[in-house]
């Protein structure tokens, strides 16, 4: 049954594969080479060998996000620190919301506090957005969330005050 659900999700989002329909070159590059990168990275073999497919897939996404962003400080409230440190060894994991470059949190977190301390270039990843669609819609409609990527299993919010607000659905 679980595989049937995965297939249904993938087929329902097939028109959003590999950045199709994204007009912004920056966002297209992000979807193609960070979100939907299929080539193996240098640390994939050591990471998450015993994890389930979804935890491993999300962990590899987080690894690519950290590798792309190269943050100084990371908030990890879902316990994927192994993937985060493999992507950037110099990043420090903090609990303080006042200073962060990248945050990986549950959707049940108080996102207003995270949004209040976000600066240009901050990235927040919310897990399990499919189970809480109304809350995810309210996050996307917040005027501070500039670029939003709906990956079904998680949502990525990028803060950039110089850009126009945009939301994308991505087949991940």
Image: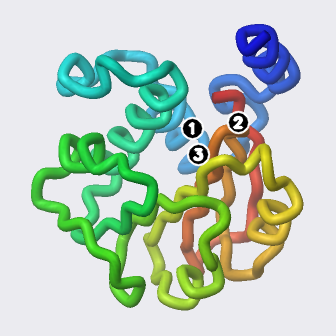
- Specify which label sits upstream in the sequence, 2 or 3: 3
Q: Nearer the viewer, mark 3 or mark 1?
A: 1
x, y percent for residue 144: 67, 81
Quarter residue 116 falls in: bottom right
Query: Residue beneath label 1, please?
Result: 31
Residue 25 to residue 135: above or below: above
Secondary structure at badge 1 equals helix
Residue 101 to residue 96: above or below: above
In depth, the one of 67 and 60 nearer the eye is 60
Real-space Cα separation, disc 3 to disc 1, in angstroms:
10 Å
What's the residue at 58%, 82% (across, down)? 115
Query: Residue beneath label 3, please?
Result: 25
Q: Nearer the viewer, mark 2 or mark 3?
A: 2
- Specify which label sits upstream in the sequence, 3 or 1: 3
Real-space Cα separation, disc 1 to disc 2, in angstroms:
8 Å
Residue 21 to residue 79: above or below: above
Is 160 situated left or right of 63 in this image?
right
Q: How many residues crowd around disc 2 within 10 Å: few (fewer than 14), some, or many (20 or more)?
A: many
Secondary structure at badge 2 equals loop
Query: Residue beneath label 2, please?
Result: 170
Say if mark 1 contacts mark 2, CB within 8 Å.
yes
Is 49 situated left or right of 132 in this image?
left
Say if mark 3 contacts mark 1, CB within 8 Å.
no
Quarter placement of the N terminus: top right
Q: Please say whether residue 55 is visible from this viewpoint.
A: yes
């Amino acid at each position: 049954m679980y595989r049937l659900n995965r297939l249904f999700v993938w087929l329902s989002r097939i028109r959003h594969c590999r950045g199709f329909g994204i007009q912004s070159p920056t966002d297209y590059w992000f979807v193609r080479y960070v979100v939907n990168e299929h080539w193996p990275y240098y640390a994939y073999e050591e990471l998450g060998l015993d994890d389930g497919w979804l935890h491993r897939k999300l962990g590899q996404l987080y690894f690519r996000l950290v590798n792309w962003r190269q943050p100084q400080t990371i908030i990890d409230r879902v316990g994927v620190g192994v993937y985060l440190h493999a992507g950037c060894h110099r990043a420090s994991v903090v609990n303080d919301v006042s200073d962060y470059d990248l945050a990986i949190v549950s959707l049940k977190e108080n996102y207003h506090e995270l949004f209040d301390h976000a600066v240009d270039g901050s990235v927040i990843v919310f897990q399990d957005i499919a189970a809480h669609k109304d809350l995810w819609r309210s996050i996307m409609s917040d005027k501070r969330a500039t670029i939003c990527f709906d990956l079904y299993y998680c949502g990525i919010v990028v803060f950039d005050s110089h850009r126009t607000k945009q939301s994308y659905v991505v087949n991940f």
